[in-house]
Amino acid sequence: MKIHLTSVFVDDQAKAEHFYTEILGFVKKHDVPVGGEDRWLTVVSPDEPDGTELLLEPAGHPAVKTYRDALVGDGIPLAQFAVDDVNAEYERLRGLGVRFTQEPLEMGPVTTAVFDDTCGNLIQIATKPQ
């Protein structure tokens, strides 16, 4: 068994597509209309085009707002992405205007940082496990 797809709820799929592809550097994998303005919109790492997909899921369900507000209010990231160098990625993203809620922090063998994805979520980046 392996993880094939996971999701983050987003307020605006077009805005999320821009942020996750143009700012974070993911690549669009699927973009299929599913009714109204909603799309089945997934992105993947350019290093693993056949790897785990991230669904940029519309945040239309009534429970989503309460759930995300609670996580953000407590500073809890919704997802974590692996990077080779958290400090370098932190500087790159800050240079692109990304707002961090936690600067790089060393925790034993792992360094993490947390940013606002502009779509209603906090996302953590962490060094890849060795």
Image (cartoon, rainbow, N blue to C red):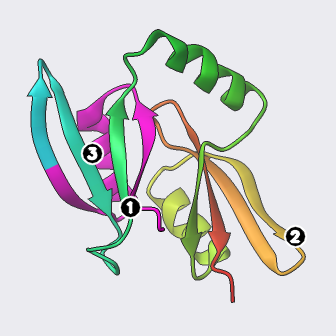
Distance Cα–Cα, label 3 vs label 2: 31 Å
x, y percent for residue 58? 33, 27
Is residue 11 found inside the magenta-colored segment of the image? yes
x, y percent for residue 50? 27, 74
Is residue 112 found inside the magenta-colored segment of the image? no
Q: Which residue is mark 3?
A: 17
Residue positioned 84% across, 71% down in the render: 106
Please give the count of numbered marks on the rendered protein. Answer: 3
Which stretch appears magenta?
1-30
Going from the N terminus, do you reach mark 3 or mark 1 first? 1
Residue at the right extreme? Answer: 108
Q: Is residue 66 left or right of residue 56?
A: right
Distance Cα–Cα, label 3 vs label 1: 19 Å
Q: Which residue is mark 2?
A: 107
Q: Label 3 neighbourhood size at 10 Å, few (<14), some (14-19), many (20+)?
A: many
Image quadrant holding the C terminus, namely: bottom right
Decide: is 93 above or below 63.
below
Q: Amino acid at mark 3?
A: Glu
Looking at the image, is mark 3 or mark 1 nearer the viewer? 1
Q: Amino acid at mark 1?
A: His
x, y percent for residue 30? 17, 53
Residue positioned 40% across, 32% down in the render: 10
Q: Which mark is residue 4?
A: 1
Mark 3: secondary structure: helix
Looking at the image, is mark 1 or mark 2 nearer the viewer? 1
